[in-house]
Amino acid sequence: MAGNTFGRIFTLTTFGESHGPAIGGIIDGCPPGIEVNFDAIQNELNRRRPGQSAIVTQRKEPDEVQFLSGIFEGKTTGAPIGFMVPNTNQKSDDYSHIKDVYRPSHADYTYDKKYGIRDYRGGGRSSARETISRVVGGAIAKQVLPQVTINAFTSSVGDIFIDKPYQDLDFSLTETNAVRCPDEASAARMEDYIKEIRKQGDTIGGTVTCVIKNVPAGLGEPVFDKLHAELGKAMLSINAVKGFEYGSGFCGAKMKGSEHNDLFNADGTTKTNLSGGIQGGISNGMDIYFRVAFKPVATIMQTQQTIDSNGNTVEMQGRGRHDPCVVPRAVPIVEAMAALVLADFYVLEYKSK
């Protein structure tokens, strides 16, 4: 199985399965001498971990990271940083009923056809539990990026949207509610809706918006390695993601050039920022902002028709512990992947000088 490494200079390789002994990774290309804030790393994992509220999966995992190499006396050495997070609360029997059955809209069928074998216990490598490694890698990447702040938040659940621009939001409120929405009125409606969906044995999708401030101008490489292209790849690699747009996004397709152009101020900043902080694939120093769309979780607690590995039509119903809406727990994952992209470009930019 290829495709387990992200990045070019600052790279993250992940390993492990949902119901194996551990999830882990190796970070390579991290500059030496960076003082590691272990509490900040664990805090990021706590934001992602299951069982943190009534609207997420109730799998109970402490998700405590253990570093194995690359850090000495609290600082990075420049050597590969190896780490692992033990799995401690697997219930593999919850998946015995799908050993030979393909769940609709899951990776079961495609994994089986590609590899001739699949780990049906929670999906193996296709499980969202793999994102633990991304969160650890992203937490390290954030510490590589001086002055850069990355704030992601839930901007919609189903047809409930925040009706304010991000400039009017207080990001300090994001972690004050289970939905991770910085608009309190919208957060309350979103949480009630997710609870209602869960009672129906169903799931719901939504969007995460991410705002990155204080990015220096000059990150990004034309032609194929544009900054927004790498951000798009990073976000689309996250489980359940169905779409990515930055800046004006699809709304920009409705506008005229005279409306869309970002006119310059004397200091090189722009009066508007419909470009989303990226022009020609290179950061221009303005805020980078983008939105990521997540589909409803595929496992639902309702009976569905599907097929088994022999092509027989069968009925199945989801079991076990699953998120009714993946969006709140995806917020730190979006931040982590954004940090990995920026750290890779940052190291590349300053290594070449």
Image (cartoon, rainbow, N blue to C red):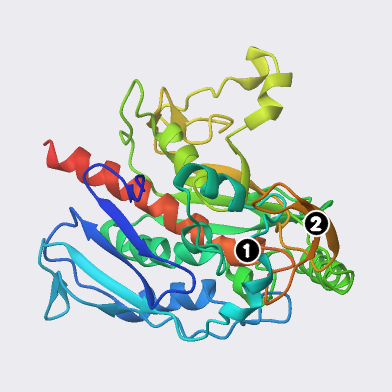
Q: Is residue 258 left or right of residue 215?
A: right
Q: Which residue is mark 1?
A: 170
The answer to whether residue 161 is seen in the rendering is: no
Res. 340 mark: none
Q: Position of residue 261 (x, y in %)?
A: 58, 19
Residue 259 quadrant = top right
Q: Is residue 181 left or right of residue 136?
A: right
> Up-down: is 144 above or below 279?
below
Instruction: Classify mark 2: residues with Cα within 10 Å, few (<14), some (14-19) or many (20+).
Output: few
Disc nearer the start of the sequence (2/1): 1
Compare residues 71 and 112 and report the one nearer the observer.
112
Compare residues 172 and 83 and report the one nearer the observer.
83
The answer to whether residue 49 is seen in the rendering is: yes
- SS for tag 2? strand
Q: Position of residue 64 (x, y in %)?
A: 39, 83
Q: Give the amino acid type for the residue marked by disc 1 in the picture.
A: Asp
Q: Residue at x 67, y 76 (%)?
A: 321
Q: Residue at x 33, y 23 (%)?
A: 222
